[in-house]
């Protein structure tokens, strides 16, 4: 039952509660004064805890909602945007029942909205970012084909450049697909259990060789009480892996040689942990900090492309952290100490 016409046939509040538990859409039952009497689990997931007892206008502050509560209208349909950790959008249908109660149905339209946004952004970004390497490849291929380059050493140099440009396009496409996937599903809360520290240690182990090539070391400090148990969280291990892989890889790329990358673990609350990645390199100006997670934003475009950056890594990190209902803060001091701090919700230790 997903239509108000179906639910309006049900008069028993107990039956309404049972229907609410069966629905994937949000369902609120409101009295004649506008007070919310009950909310199913989907509505709580959409709008947050503590709905029962609040006035509907506090939750959805719209004139057309007030018209129904005042009895001047028997029903209305509207679009409502809820700003939680991630933006969500709903089609809201409100109808008065015969016995004075008011039924509110929330249909989650976030997935459809995200898909449309990803489609638009994907076309715009791909057309812009792929034009440069494609132009370069086409130029070298044309030069070789018309035999303007006859000596083998020059051809080898051209082929190496072409290989680098092809690799850049491949990395760009991989990151675009990863970002698109995360953006589309950002509103869906992950439900798997992830051993957070095991994931972080695995990422560190996978990147130690790369750090060693630049004479850098990776140091892990866990400031929790000695003997503390495993940190578990709700999430997807692959996505959490991607967060810390991107952050530590960035620290290796942009840090100075012969420095130490510091990974610090702090238990902020029983249900929250902060893991920070700190490196020493060039200072990032204050004006850039808030824009680092924008897609394709680069502080130094030439250097970023020289070391193989696509400009999407931190955008991917932001959306994955949002999906896991976490937060990320970036700071950079005058002496070149840059710190990416990710706060994530965790389950009670066991």
Image (cartoon, helix red, strand yellow):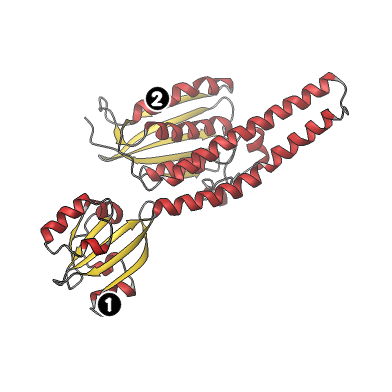
Which is nearer the eye, 103 or 196? 103
- The spot of residue 22 in percent (x, y) is 21, 50
Question: Vertically, is 139 above or below 15?
Answer: above
Q: Sort mark 1 into few (<14), some (14-19) or many (20+) by Cα contacts within 10 Å.
A: some
Quadrant in the picture for the N terminus: bottom left
Check contact, mark 1 vs mark 2: CB within 8 A. Answer: no
Q: CA distance from mark 1 to mark 2?
A: 59 Å
Residue in the picture at 24% in, 58% down: 27
Res 73 label: 1
- The spot of residue 92 in percent (x, y) is 32, 63
Confirm whether residue 68 shows in the render: yes
- The spot of residue 243 in percent (x, y) is 44, 35
- The spot of residue 327 in percent (x, y) is 39, 45
Res 18 label: none
Left/right of residue 212 with respect to residue 27 in the rendered view: right
Question: Vertically, is 155 above or below 83?
Answer: above
Mark 1, mark 2: which one is toward the viewer? 1
Res 201 label: 2
Q: Secondary structure at mark 2?
A: helix
Question: Vertically, is 50 above or below 301?
Answer: below
Question: Vertically, is 246 above or below 334?
Answer: above
């Amino acid at each position: 039952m997903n239509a108000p016409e179906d639910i309006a046939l049900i008069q028993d509040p107990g039956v309404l509660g049972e229907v609410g538990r069966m629905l994937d859409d949000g369902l609120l039952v409101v009295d004649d004064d506008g007070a919310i009497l009950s909310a199913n689990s989907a509505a709580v997931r959409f709008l947050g805890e503590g709905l029962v007892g609040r006035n509907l206008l506090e939750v959805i502050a719209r004139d057309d909602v007030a018209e129904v509560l005042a009895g001047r209208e028997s029903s209305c349909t509207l679009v409502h945007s809820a700003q939680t950790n991630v933006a969500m959008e709903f089609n809201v249908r409100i109808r008065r029942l015969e016995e004075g109660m008011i039924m509110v149905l929330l249909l989650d339209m976030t997935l459809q909205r995200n898909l449309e946004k990803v489609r638009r952004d994907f076309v715009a970004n791909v057309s812009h970012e792929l034009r440069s390497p494609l132009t370069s490849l086409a130029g070298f291929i044309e030069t070789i084909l018309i035999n303007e380059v006859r000596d083998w050493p020059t051809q080898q140099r051209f082929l190496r450049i072409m290989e680098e440009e092809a690799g850049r396009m491949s990395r760009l496409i991989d990151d675009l697909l990863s970002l698109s996937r995360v953006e589309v599903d950002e509103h869906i809360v992950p439900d798997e259990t992830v051993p957070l520290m095991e994931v972080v240690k695995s990422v560190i182990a996978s990147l130690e060789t790369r750090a060693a090539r630049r004479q850098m070391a990776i140091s892990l400090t866990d400031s929790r009480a000695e003997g503390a148990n495993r940190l578990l969280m709700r999430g997807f291990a692959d996505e959490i892996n991607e967060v810390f892989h991107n952050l530590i890889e960035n620290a290796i790329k942009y840090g100075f040689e012969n420095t130490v990358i510091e990974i610090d673990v702090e238990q902020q609350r029983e249900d929250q942990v902060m893991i920070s990645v700190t490196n020493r390199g060039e200072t990032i100006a204050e004006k850039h900090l808030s824009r680092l997670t924008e897609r394709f934003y680069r502080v130094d475009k030439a250097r970023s492309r020289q070391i193989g950056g696509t400009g999407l890594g931190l955008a991917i990190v932001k959306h994955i952290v949002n999906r896991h209902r976490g937060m990320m803060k970036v700071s950079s001091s005058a002496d070149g100490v840059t710190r990416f701090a990710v706060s994530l919700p965790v389950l009670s230790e066991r």
